[in-house]
Amino acid sequence: MAQEPPTETLSNLLQESRRFAPPAELAAAANVTEAAYGEAAADRLAFWEKQAERLHWNTKWDNALDWSNPPFAKWFTGGQLNVAYNCVDRHVEAGNGDKVAYHWEGEPGDTRTITYADLKREVGKAANALIELGVNKGDRVAIYMPMIPETVIAMLACARLGAPHTVVFGGFSSDALRNRIEDCGAHIVITADGGYRRGAASALKPAVDEAIEGLDHVRNVLVVRRTGQDVAWTDGRDLWWHEFVDGQSEEHEAQPHDAEHPLYVMYTSGTTAKPKGILHTSGGYLTQVSWTHHAVFDLKPDTDVFWTAADIGWVTGHSYIVYGPLSNGATSVMYEGTPDTPHKGRWWELVEKYKVTILYCAPTAIRTFMKWGTEIPAQHDLSSLRLLGSVGEPINPEAYIWYRTNIGGDRTPVVDTWWQTETGALMISPLPGVTHGKPGAAMRPLPGIDADVVDDQGKPVPDGGGGFLVVKEPWPSMLRTIWGDDERYVKTYWSRFDGLYFAGDGAKKDEDGDLWLLGRVDDVMLVSGHNISTTEVESALVSNPKVAEAAVVGATDPTTTQAIVAFVILRGDSIDDGDALVAELRDHVARHLGPIAKPRQIMIVPELPKTRSGKIMRRLLRDVAEHRSLGDVTTLTDSTVMDLIKEKLPAQK
Ligand code: WT7
């Protein structure tokens, strides 16, 4: 039986007033102290120039920021560097070649240890292979891979040559892959026969074959053998990595590229419209991912073992599995598979095995672990952990406390990090040696980041007020444009408020001026003239001990404009006694947030529809709540989920 935390705590969570001060030892040795805020406030550009010194530049920049043509920013103009050299070679040259870059663990339990020297050799060979395939600086390369070391090697080989990569999550369909390959005009696709997921080999190569049919600009497909499953082969086009790459010379001298040279295009998860190809460039991006990784995760390269439990196919993986950690010479864990294979304690087994000190993951994972119960992590020694991070959506106070208590042994700070594919790196987050954390709050903009909450006129709201999250000044790792569509870039991000970057998120400032993220503004409901955030209702539901996870949408309602409809997953040991439970949960929300927030309808469901990056697709739930046929489901992790949900629906009234 899952052991539940005391209910006195639970009933107070929404008014959770506990603050968690940094542990004294961590604060005393923290990489970044309070002084950084003052320093950055005094001279933001000088602050970022100082952080850029973390990197090796072949030519120093002339100008920190060129903002002469807003909103098109150029950082560190005139500067030249090589991103892969910064992530690999310089650590080897500094005598750290034997240091482990990745403890890699395959889902079936096979392992590989990759040192910085190994990485240098492998990246050199892969770079030479791409050159032989005619890849020139500026050419795009698509990467459609499982979570294996070759994925990182391929990215770094591209970075080395200045060939922007576009990594497409290995779980995406061939349609999604084709759209992305077409949109960025890739010439080469790097893939694998398959990868392991949920205990079985899951094929990737057939999706590539389908995706590139008739696309003349794709010349070659480079295939890593991972699972050994049968693959169809197109002679002259397809090449095995172990034949073509392994035979190449390890020697490749990295050439410097301009600070603004494109590094990669990452397509956003596409919960709504056509995916946007977010363009990131080299110098500013690497500066901010490197510094934030150092500052927010307090990374000590000689003693920490860092684990971002996310997929490389989304920006969290790019910035905090690959570029941030490698630029800092960190040792990371990289895991191929799912958290419940072969058993639900797999993550905790890995933490124990590799003595992970810093874990970074998403609230959706944390809530899944809550659902599975505390006895599972309790079976493992998690005492190596000293810092926990969260990203991807607002972390409910309940999940924050659960994470801190059951994973962090009530000792580790939790850093709730707000950022986006578009921002490239962390933007709003506690500093673990400085901030007194509040469960559920991302707290303050990091030093060097000028973000605020404004009203619909673009005026800053006072403390205690709510509105829209904006960024007021350009930041080094900001997106430079949407690939091939400058106009959409301006329209999407810079048109809602004059001169401000509009993130699309709702937020509020509490009485101390700390920031609470409330989800996408499209997820704010209008109920009888009141704005109610889906996140707040979800947090209220999750604070009931019977609830593991909740998703809330506003459905059109003839009397109240929108009515609140909630989809709820119960914790493992809770009993669904039908109407009684629904009544209890509705009252629970009313008690916490007021009667106005009482859901009209609550449906107990087995699963929720999520994108690959773990975001709930409220659009689909709204379709269900409004009895419409479902929109595009291609970005769902598991498209059968919607059938499971529809089965649970009451007959239409
Ligand atoms: C959106 C960006 C950045 C990598 C993960 C997702 C939401 C992200 C938080 C957080 C509240 C968060 C926002 C944001 N989000 N982190 N700590 N608290 N909301 O990247 O897919 O580009 O999504 O995720 O709504 O706009 P993404």
Image (cartoon, grey):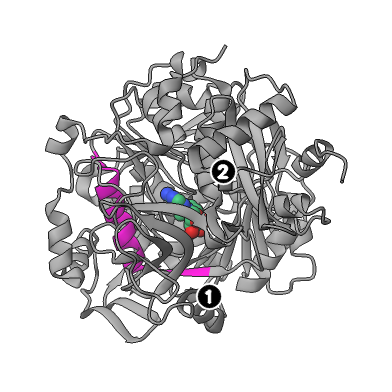
Residue type at mark 2 is Pro
Residue in the picture at 51% in, 68% down:
278
Q: Residue tagged by mark 2?
A: 595
Q: Nearer the viewer, mark 2 or mark 1?
A: 2
Q: Which residues are magenta?
A: 278-301
Give the x, y percent position of residue 445. Answer: 29, 58
Residue in the picture at 63% in, 58% down:
271
Alpha-carbon neighbours of circle 1 within 10 Å: few (<14), some, or many (≥20)? Answer: some
Does residue 541 appear in the picture of this structure?
no
Give the x, y percent position of residue 421. Answer: 48, 60
Looking at the image, how many numbered discs can be counted on the residues? Answer: 2
Left or right: 79 with respect to 539?
A: left
Q: Residue tagged by mark 1?
A: 492
Is 376 colored magenta in this rendering?
Answer: no
Left or right: 327 with respect to 517?
A: left
Q: Which mark is residue 647?
A: none
